[in-house]
Amino acid sequence: MSKNYCLIMAGGSGTRFWPRSRVVKPKQYLSLFGDLSLIQESVQRFANFIPEDRIYVVSAKSQQEVLESQTTNLPKENMIYEPVGKNTLPAIGLAALFIAEKDPDGILIVSPSDHLIQNDELFQQCIESAALIAEKNDGIVTIGISPKYPATGYGYVQTAEEIQIGQSIKSFAVTQFVEKPNVEVATGYLKSGGFFWNSGIFIFKVSVFLESVQKYAPELYADLMRIKEHIGAETYEEAVDRIYREVTSISIDYGILEKASNVFLVQGDFIWNDLGSWEEVYKYDSNKDENQNATSGEVVLIDTKNSYVYAPNSLVAVVGLEDVIVVQEGDTILVCKRDRAEDIKAVVGEITKRKLDRYL
């Protein structure tokens, strides 16, 4: 059996977690539920069953300092940097070039760096089942999360017949990837069955992935082959900076998965959340008080319920409020209703518009 490799994608900006998330330290580098940051938790999760020298990270060049400071257990040569963000397909393609140099038929597990995953044992079983399908079927495999409610913030994957190749976890052929639906459509998905949330975790042979890029995204493939010529040479940095800026920004979903026929899904029943807002952090914080408040730091609460208050560096008092989020970070303070947590990205937009870059 081919060796398993892991690629953790860590280039996101995490604007919905302002003011803690900043340009130089986005969401994936924050500790939200304990001492470890989200990316450190991701590395640790995969290191349980993949050697650290086969764990790679792709990130933005601007995040090099914070990334390397938080992943000192990984080889520095496993850190792959994009000069500019170009979405998931080019990022995976760039990293795949390096892994293909070592093991072109290796199984690559691609995972976001900033999701909440609990029940590591079941997660590992799902990944190993997916790797078996990728190995035996030359398939592109995704982990689908069993939907708990008609979510409108996730993409969905529709499945067809169940497949069996010796693994215990349920697996299916994939019919289609579908856009984020409205609540009526999402409700219909749950009623009809056979739909899963798209976790953004993908598993495939490196060779199968590169063949798929060549078939479905030939222009990107040509650019990647131009970059490949410079790997290991002194010209690499200049070449990747010049060539990569020319590639089209596209997701792996649009670029390959919606077109390919060899796509499969492994059912994931572990606890999963993409942590898209402070509201999700509040929901998954297990240290709530009797009034369902989650706090961190010196916090005084009077007649306050169902709220999240983060204030590690100053005293914050909240009086007579319910369902609020308060986050203090340095010289910035965020206060919002919990049901408006998604609108924080509009705050970042306004700060940018006003050219108040020192707060970003």
Image (cartoon, helix red, strand yellow):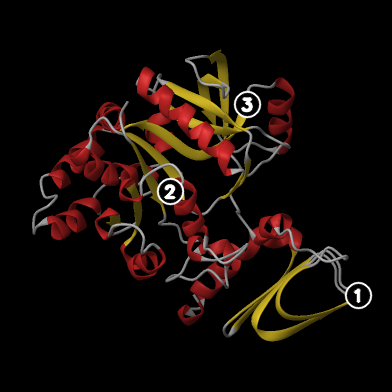
Name the element at disc 2. Answer: helix
Picture coordinates of residue 169, whole percent (x, y): 57, 24
Q: Give the position of the N terminus as an image quadrant.
A: top left
Q: Is residue 154 left or right of residue 112?
A: right
User: Number of labelled discs?
Assistant: 3
Q: Residue at x 16, y 47 (%)?
A: 227
Name the element at disc 1. Answer: loop
Picture coordinates of residue 57, whole percent (x, y): 35, 53
Q: Residue at x 68, y 61 (%)?
A: 341
Q: Residue at x 19, y 54 (%)?
A: 240
- Mark positioned earlier in the residue sequence (2 or 3): 2
Residue at numbered disc 3? 195
Residue at numbered disc 2? 47
| Viewer-nearest of discs 1 and 2 | 2
- Mark positioned earlier in the residue sequence (1 or 2): 2
**Label 1: few (<14), some (14–19) or many (≥20) C-alpha neighbours in 10 Å:** few
Residue at numbered disc 1? 303
Q: Is residue 309 left or right of residue 255?
A: right
Specify whether residue 152 is in view. Answer: yes
Disc 2 marks a residue whose amino acid type is: Ala
**Label 2: few (<14), some (14–19) or many (≥20) C-alpha neighbours in 10 Å:** some
